[in-house]
Amino acid sequence: MRMALWVVLVLDQLFILLIGSMRLERFNVSDIALKDQLSDLPASLTKIRRQLHKLLPEVKLLQQVELVLAGVVAVVLWGTLFGMFMGALLTIVSLMIIKILSRVLFVQKYASDLFDKTVESVLWAANFFRPLWRVLGTPKRVVSATPSSLHELVDLLNNLPLTVLTSTQHDRLLAVIDSETKVVKDVMTPKAKVVSVVPSATLGPIVLSDLQKSGHGYFPVVAKKSEPEGILSLGDIADIHNVKTHTTVRDIMGTQLIWVEEDTSLQELVQAFLQEKQYLMFVRNLNGDFTGIVTIADLLRQLIGVVKE
């Protein structure tokens, strides 16, 4: 009889150790983080993880109930084997040892692996004892307010009320975050949409009027089916009375061209603008072909999110 009690006691202590070593907090994630995790899991596990996510408060409560019941059994067994006073003392000592062992990574890993293998049974039990949870009261799910990924941060920003962030502040923050993954190709004006002038154009009233109506202040100078030759600024021809008759674009255009690659990051583009002190830069692809232009306005539109088209 005494040997049987010892066997039950050892099993009970192992049960407390394994249950106490399970770290269920690793499943306590936001809905957006759960979606990210499920994308890497096979279809057979997706349904189980969704159910665990939904029933996590009940599973935690089940774990607490199991620990309480196993603790009561331990107190009774220690008391039966060694008497009331010594049994209480040994119960405290054993729980302290279990508490220490539950922090050992090997034990935690074994407990987690065991939980993963028996999670379907755990979920069944959590559902079975649902009436009991109504009596005890299920704790509310508490997810950390600290985002664990960039995706989760964006989701958090999108769900903040206007009392926290105005729409302008919201757009600016998202623009800054979005700029981390963008390159020049994402913000530039493609070659087909660039308003340009040919170098041989005469700066008469009609040409000047067309340039002013475009709303731009700088214009690439490009001959048809050719590479850019320069930049024409409206500031250079602001005083039309000082421009000689029949003056061509080539005569007054700027010839300093700054080139950037399509895959240049926006952070590198900022540095280039600061260093070169230019408003407009020309963009080329890996083959060296002219593919578009990028301006400070394009950059601000992305980084600050307030400059409109």
Image: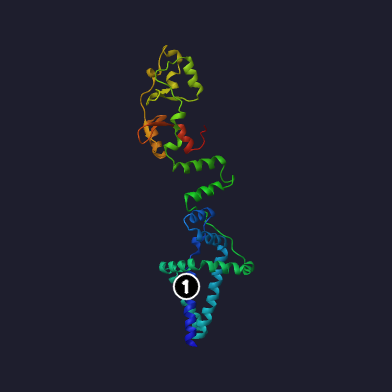
Quadrant hosting residue 121? bottom right
Viewer-proximal residue, 254 or 112? 112
Whether residue 82 is visible to the viewer of this picture, yes or no, is no
Tell me which corner region of the image, top left, top right, bottom left or bottom right, holds residue 188: top left
Residue 106 in which image quadrant: bottom left
Q: Nearer the viewer, residue 159 or 53?
A: 53
Vertical position of residue 145 compared to residue 88: above or below? above
Q: Position of residue 241 (x, y in %)?
A: 45, 13
Which residue occupies 57% across, 68% down?
124
| 206 versus 282 height, above or below | above
Q: Would you name the residue on which mark 1 appears?
A: 17
Q: Secondary structure at mark 1?
A: helix
| Residue 68 screen position, x and y as percent | 55, 73
For the point 41% across and 22% down, the residue is: 232
Q: Is residue 34 visible?
A: yes
Q: Measuring from the top left, give residue 242's x and y in whole percent.
A: 43, 13
Considering depth in this image, is 71 or 213 the residue closer to the camera?
A: 213
**Amino acid under disc 1:** Leu
Q: Which x, y percent locates residue 182?
A: 44, 41
